[in-house]
Image (cartoon, grey):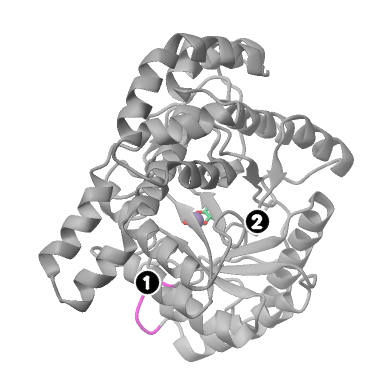
Amino acid sequence: MRIDKQQIATINEGLLTDHNRRFANLLSDIDNAEAIIEKLMAFQIGIPSWALGAGGTRFGRFHFGGAPATLEEKIEDVGLLHALNRNSGSISLHIPWDIPQDYAAIKQVAAENEIKFDAVNSNTFQDQPGQPLSYKFGSLQNVDKAVRKQAIEHNIEVIKHGVELGSKALTVWLADGSCFPGQLSFRNAFNNTLESLSEIYSALPEDWKVFVEYKAFEPNFYSTTVGDWGQSLLYASKLGKKAYTLVDLGHHLPNANIEQIVALLLNEGKLGGFHFNDSKYGDDDLTAGSIKPYQLFLIFNELVDGMDARGMNHASDLGWMIDASHNVKDPLEDLLQSVEAIMAAYAQALLVDKKALEEARQNSDVAKAQEILQNAFRTDVRPLVAEARRRAGGALQPLSLYRQLGIREQLIKQRGADSQTTGL
Ligand code: LRH
Ligand code: MN
């Protein structure tokens, strides 16, 4: 199904008076609105193909009707999100959950929905039916060279799919690690993984990147072979200039200072991208900004500062992607809320008075520095984000329009109440 621009413009009409009042009110407080709106319109977030249906845990999965059963339907769902907020312009595929059967046909569907292909993800954390060798004891780290070879070949196959679709990056997340002391030689696991990654690295096209995603724990619960930012940076530095680290917000130990990690990885020129989500305890994959919105703002504050210090293009020089799993919310509503939270954090970070902040820091005026940051964080930027959407042909209020148009009901009518989707 499609939402046409006219439908959106008509609904926006009814909301315009209220919107313009709020927007005008905000304009009286800020002096760089046009520059911010331009940046917001250019900012595109990659939607995970594996998070368009109901997620679940080992304790259960509660269905959402109308789930996309094919890659075409997944791209159409991302097309729906993009039509509503104009900031969801790409899909991140996971192989083998989303193997394209017909590249031309898939690219056609994507073009019709104005969707590009973001980083492709390999999967050596599950054994596929008929797979000769198991990844039970790891993939790229495995003591068995044949298992490592199988995993390397899978990653090279994933790159091939990505090249056909126009993707420019491979994300490697490894579940590899150990569950008990003594099980693993940390040095051998590191060296095997580095050797394997370098074979994958050498298969990368010249203009591609590889994102090494780290994670503290799960599914291994004693050690993880790419367990934190330092280990990921070690791999990325040893691999070469096409290798970067990927920060999944849910992959840190409790109370980790993620904004500091982001600042340092940017300073090293080794920050490749993000998997945005939120969490209270572990890798909860909750809606971005739903638990720790101030942390999301502080991360964007470091991103804007660090990217500007390097003259980087905010929209295109880093991989902006969501990684979520929906246990109780409608997947599309959850993703609309995540995009909204990410855009709001970015807009607030662009509001920070950098000159005044630097002055406060030079004077070690700690209270003043906090006032400057929290003034930006406490600014209600929703009219600014909405105005950027409106100018890009999107909805002033994407979530209420999604409900007003009864999109989930229509998807259930089209696909059935128990259509199955691939993914986590
Ligand atoms: C691992 C992870 C990784 C994906 C998977 C779906 O926790 O964040 O990015 O491959 O989720
Ligand atoms: Mn992730």
Question: Mark 1 vs ligand 2: CB under 8 Å?
Answer: no
Q: Is residue 253 visible?
A: no
Query: Is residue 191 inside the magenta stretch?
Result: no
**On screen, 100 above or below 236?**
above
Estimate the x, y position of residue 293 in percent, counting from the top left.
Answer: 29, 47
Q: Is residue 218 left or right of residue 355?
A: right
Mark 1 = which residue?
Answer: 261
User: Identity of the amino acid at label 1?
Assistant: Ile
Disc number lying in front (1 or 2) = 1
Identity of the residue drawn at 76% across and 71% down:
204
- Judging depth in this view, the residue of 308 and 240 nearest the camera is 308
Mark 2 = which residue?
Answer: 119
Q: Is residue 87 visible?
A: yes
Q: Is residue 19 left or right of residue 198?
A: left
Question: Mark 2 vs ligand 1: CB under 8 Å?
Answer: no
Identity of the residue drawn at 51% across and 34% down:
388
Q: Earlier in the sequence, mark 1 or mark 2?
A: 2
The number of numbered badges drawn on the structure is 2
User: Identity of the amino acid at label 2?
Assistant: Ala
Estimate the x, y position of residue 63 in percent, counting from the top left.
Answer: 47, 25
Q: Dot 1, how many residues are within 10 Å of its Cα: few (below 14), some (14-19), or many (20+)?
A: some
**On screen, 53 above or below 200?**
above
The residue segment tinted magenta is 178-182
**On screen, 300 above or below 277?**
below
Q: Is residue 325 left or right of residue 413?
A: left
Q: Quadrant of residue 264?
A: bottom left
Identity of the residue drawn at 34% across and 81% down:
181
Give SS at disc 2.
loop
Give SS at disc 1.
helix
| Alpha carbons under labels 1 and 2: distance apart | 22 Å
Q: Quadrant of residue 142?
A: bottom right
